[in-house]
Image: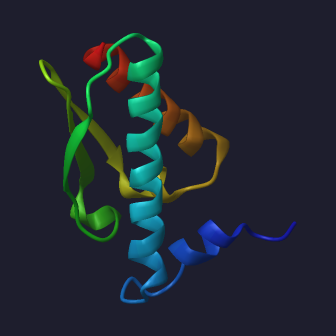
């Protein structure tokens, strides 16, 4: 089986521009999914966000702060889970997204 483009990016040198681009793409996908989930739940606020992160697992948990008009929540994921393509990694991300939607609605 051929590795996915994302998994090949993760294995690259962290100084290669493909690594931060993929990281930001995945963070943007989380933000978009949470915003959509809030909207569908009837919370029509624009989602604000900030990040606190660094390259690689050795840097600890990647944190995404999400804020609506009246609530805020943290999405915290290990680098490997955020950047991984395994089913378990996707499940961790999906659970974090679901928790964030619940906290913000």
Kindly identify the residue that appears in the image at 55 percent across and 44 percent down. Answer: 89
Residue furthest left in the image: 70
Name which quarter of the figure residue 42 lies in: top left
Name which quarter of the figure residue 87 lies in: top right
Give coordinates of residue 37: x percent, y percent: 45, 23
Q: Is residue 81 left or right of residue 78?
A: right
Q: Is residue 63 left or right of residue 35?
A: left
Q: Nearer the viewer, residue 27 or 76?
A: 27
Kindly identify the residue that appears in the image at 49 percent across and 59 percent down. Answer: 83
Where's the C terminus, which quadrant? Answer: top left
Kindly identify the residue that appears in the image at 63 percent across and 76 percent down. Answer: 8
Where's the N terminus, which quadrant? Answer: bottom right
Give coordinates of residue 45: x percent, y percent: 26, 25
Colouring mode (rainbow / by chain / secondary structure / one colour):
rainbow
In this rendering, the answer to whether 41 lies above or below 44 is: above
Q: Is residue 86 left or right of residue 30?
A: right
In this rendering, the answer to whether 41 lies above or below 8 is: above
Kindly identify the residue that appears in the image at 36 percent across and 89 percent down. Answer: 15
Give coordinates of residue 80: x percent, y percent: 45, 57
Residue furthest right in the image: 1
């Amino acid at each position: 089986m051929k590795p996915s483009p994302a998994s090949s990016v993760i294995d690259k040198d962290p100084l290669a521009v493909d690594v931060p681009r993929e990281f930001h793409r995945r963070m943007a996908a989380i933000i978009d999914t949470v915003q959509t989930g809030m909207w569908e739940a009837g919370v029509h606020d624009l989602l604000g966000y900030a990040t606190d992160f660094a390259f690689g697992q050795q840097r600890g948990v990647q944190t995404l702060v999400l804020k609506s008009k009246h609530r805020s929540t943290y999405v915290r994921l290990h680098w490997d889970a955020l950047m991984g393509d395994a089913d378990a990694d996707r499940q961790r991300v999906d659970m974090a997204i679901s928790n964030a939607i619940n906290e913000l609605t």
